[in-house]
Amino acid sequence: MRSLPAVASIRAAPSPMRAAPRRFRRCCSRRIVPSPAPGIMSPCRRWRLSEILGASSLVVELGARRRLLRRLPGVRAVDGVDLSVEEGETFGIVGESGCGKTTLARTLLGLQREAAGEIRLAGRPVSGEAPRQARATRAAIQYVHQDPGAALDPWWTVGATLAEGLAIHGVAAAERQGRIAETLSAVGLDPALAARYPHELSGGQQRRIGLARILLLRPRIVILDEPTAGLDLSVQAAVLRLLRALRGRFGLTLIFISHDLSVVRRVCDRVAVMYLGRIVEQGSTAEIFAAPRHPYTRALLAAAPHLDGRDSGPSLQGDPPSLRAVPTGCRFHPRCPAALPLCAERAPATEAVAPGHAVACHRWREAA
């Protein structure tokens, strides 16, 4: 068995940023956070000693252009997002297609530049940088693509693809092959697969190659975009078990983006629900699934299919509005069965339902 030595050898050479959290924790412990108004959740309220990645009032604009005398605004794919990811947890982000999940992930990664707001990595602000500089600063964050097959060059062997990342990060040629073999073993693959091409691999093997590709760089945070999409149930279960094992062995923090609520319920510690660029509810997975407070969260859970024969709940009415014509007030009110005139006039504030559970809805108390 080569898997255990492989894991040990990879863990033996920590990332240069491994020592960062302790230094930043001392700084965060002296941070003075103003008290929010009663019942209102402050964006900084969740700053804890264990926060590894966070964002406050984050705004991302897509399609904005500058003309000679004026600036043409784009659409706000992410609008005023506050979140805090704790070290070592699996944080889920769910919502309909087009709600801004992937754009938020790309912004946290540094591929997309934020228009406003703050991003924190290990307690240190890292926002306001150009994409190239942002990726260098946030090298501890890595991303696993939604379609791992499309992310692999069909003309390159698996070994050549994996070696490319090591070469870019300055790893010596003599060390690359050994590290590749060790990492392939760590994700449950035969190192001999390095000589194969992507089309010779199954869907599950391609997922594992995608994980190996980023584990070679020894990240602290891994963003997984639909990691189980397109896989049958047996392969999904194997991938989820692997993710759980890798999180424990390498001390990873996972950000899990998915449409599959059953998978999110199984693997995530906390969940954020996004709708039209905003987080409408977030909290522990157990509490979100047992007692959702936002009508959109309840509709998502009710519409999820059941394998035991139970009928799914009513589907959401209509399609999400365009980001170019965002409704006034609460963005969900045109599709909400419980909407009041107030919902169309004023956007709801994010309120604390319970410790660690927040919701943005005028009528959440009636759902208690």
Image (cartoon, rainbow, N blue to C red):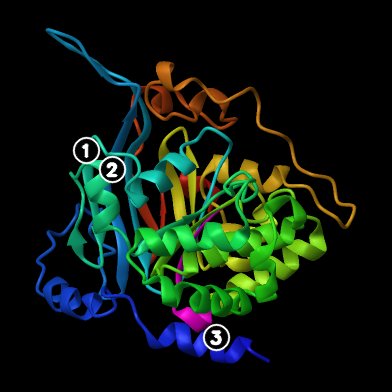
State how far apart marks 1 and 2 are (Cα).
Answer: 6 Å
Can you say whether 287 is above or below 37 in the image? below
- Please state which of the two labelled residues, at mark 3 or mark 2, is closer to the viewer: 3
Q: Do the residues labelled 3 and 2 touch (CB within 8 Å)?
A: no
| Crowd around label 2: few <14 · some 14–19 · many ≥20 (10 Å) | many
* Quarter location, residue 113: top left
Q: Dot 3, how many residues are within 10 Å of its Cα: few (below 14), some (14-19), or many (20+)?
A: many
Outermost right residue: 309
Residue 144 in magenta?
no
Residue at 53% x, 73% y is 180
Q: In which quarter of the image is residue 357?
A: bottom left
Q: Which amino acid type is marked by label 1?
A: Ala
Question: Image check: 126 left or right of 257?
Answer: left
Nearest to N terminus: mark 1 or mark 2: 2
Give yes or no for contact between labels 3 and 1 (Cβ–Cβ under 8 Å).
no
Q: Position of residue 100 (x, y in %)?
A: 46, 37
Q: As drawn, which residue projects farthest toward the front?
A: 174
Disc nearer the start of the sequence (3/1):
3
Circle 3 residue: 6
Q: What residue type is labelled 3?
A: Ala
Residue 197 bears which disc, if any? none
Expressed as whole percent of the image width and height from the top left, the position of residue 211 reads 56, 64
Q: Name the residue under label 2.
A: 58
Q: Where is residue 351 in the image (x, y as percent from the top left)?
A: 35, 50
The residue stretch that appears in magenta:
248-257
Q: How far apart are marks 3 and 2 (CA)?
A: 39 Å
Residue 98 relative to residue 27: left or right: right
Nearer-N-terminus badge (3/2): 3
